[in-house]
Amino acid sequence: MTTVLGPSAINKRTFTEWSECGKALDLICDTRNGTVTIPKEKIMKAELRVSTMLSCGTATKTQLLQLLGSLRHVTTCCTPARAFYQRLQSAATTTPRYKRLRLSEEAVEDLKWFRYILQHHERFNGIPVAQFCQRVDSDGARAHGRFR
């Protein structure tokens, strides 16, 4: 790269040392143990947003989108959460801008479910990488090996 772009092309301050534990997509990856962990502050932030929305009973489009941004880590690491996330996503996309939406009973139940699993943040520590992998063979059968 230095040959083509010159000696000033590489900024050594932007390179990090090799480590067995790194951060990717705001998740902590441990390559030695083959695990992924959601940082505790991300879980606490999502839990606070869920609790706030449950106590208000209403939300704006912006608040719903912020909540979905906080919950995306949970849906990445917890497959059953995707169905609950999708229902909240549809509520966010149908809400008009600058208008408060009264949360439906289904949305409230979904938020209660998220609040319950977020209270057990230890379940998001050390999730095996194999849970995120999937490979489809030529005959269409699924096997582990490739990210979805």
Image (cartoon, rainbow, N blue to C red):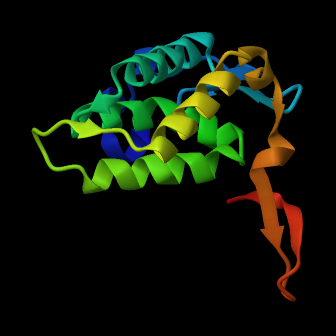
Residue 37: % across, % down:
71, 24
Side of 69 where 61 appears, left or right: left
Front position in the image: 80 or 113: 113
Question: In the displayed image of the protein, which residue is found farthest to the left?
Answer: 98
Q: Nearer the viewer, residue 76 or 18?
A: 76
Q: Position of residue 143 (x, y in %)?
A: 89, 66
**Placement of the N terminus among the 4 image quadrants:** top left
In this view, the residue farthest toward the bottom is: 139
Question: Which residue is nearer to you in this view: 69 or 86?
Answer: 86
2 up-or-down from 106: above or below: above
| Residue drawn at point x = 29 percent, y = 30 percent | 58
Above or below residue 36? Residue 91 is below
Q: Quadrant of residue 118?
A: top right
Residue 83: % across, % down? 61, 53
Relative to 121, is 33 above or below?
A: below
Q: Residue at x 10, y 38 (%)?
A: 98
Quarter containing the C terminus: bottom right
x, y percentage for residue 47? 53, 18
**Location of residue 81 by image quarter:** top right
Q: How many marks?
A: 0
Q: Quadrant of residue 126?
A: top right
**Residue in view at x 23 percent, y 49 percent:** 95
Residue drawn 35% across the image and 29% down it: 7
